[in-house]
Image: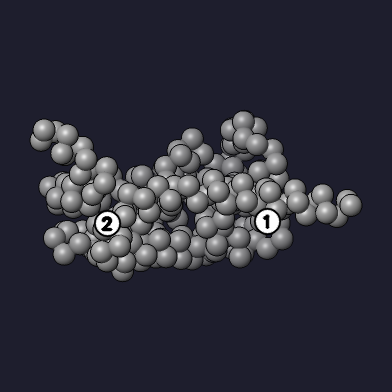
Amino acid sequence: MSSITMIWDVIWHPLTVLVPLTNQLGTGIYPVLFFLIFLESGMLIFSFIPGQSLLFMVGSIAANPHSELNIWWLVLMFTLAATAGSAVKYFTTRKWGDLQDKLIDRLPAEKVAQATAVFTRNQDQTLLIGRFIPFVGLFVPIIAGTTDMNWRQFRLFNLLGSFIWVVSCSAVGYFFGNTPFIQQNFTWLFIGLLAVPFLARQGWQYYRQTRSTTSRN
């Protein structure tokens, strides 16, 4: 019965398990979280890691009065991880573009074309907010590496974009993580955050198809 209760708590009340778990791991949890965001930001093969959901979850854990996680250290660490990861994508594309091309060829051509079009329209703004745009955020550093964007320009806007992304997602979890609504519905919210990119992509695709059909008529 105890094991069933534990599984139930992990599924529907994860904070009651995650807070003591992170406390037990101590400072060892920081490098683990760093590399999760670094891998998600730096390598296409790890793009399945739910970066935004992870930031929200960790922010919620840090907001718990019993948690030993420091939100300021988390924001700094996640910003460095996201910035470094995107820089790896940028330099990898610059030096080994053929390798990235092979990975991109396995992805939907239409999605890659949309990401390229968004970046081409406004490079700086895309670097700032690209991580919030489904699918686009994965390719912004790669596209930047294939264009005439120099390292100095990329470095600045990559850092600012990573900071905005980390602060926004972590702050939502931190400032609302202690509210009864979040605590009671944390699992559903986490699943919702996982589903947002997929739903947004489908909605955007439906919108484009509808607009294209209307214009032809």
Location of mark 2 (residue):
184
Instruction: Examine the rendered structure and indicate whether residue 134 appears above or below residue 127.
Output: above
Viewed as shown, does residue 182 lie left or right of 9?
Answer: right
Location of mark 1 (residue):
118
Residue closest to the far right: 217
Instruction: Identify which amino acid the numbered label 2 is placed on.
Output: Gln
Instruction: Where is residue 178? Give x, y as percent.
Output: 25, 65
Instruction: Where is residue 185? Give x, y as percent.
Output: 31, 55
Q: Nearer the viewer, residue 77 or 109?
A: 109
Residue at the spot 21% in from the left edge and 58% down from the top edge = 69
Q: How many marks?
A: 2
Residue at the spot 65% in from the left edge and 52% down from the top edge = 204
Residue closest to the far left: 2
Instruction: Examine the rendered structure and indicate whether residue 71 appears above or below residue 32.
Output: below
Q: Nearer the viewer, residue 6 or 18?
A: 6
Residue closest to the far bottom: 175
Instruction: Examine the rendered structure and indicate whether residue 178 appears above or below residue 53.
Output: below
Q: Is residue 185 visible?
A: yes
Q: Quadrant of the N terminus?
A: top left
Instruction: Where is residue 79? Give x, y as percent.
Output: 39, 59
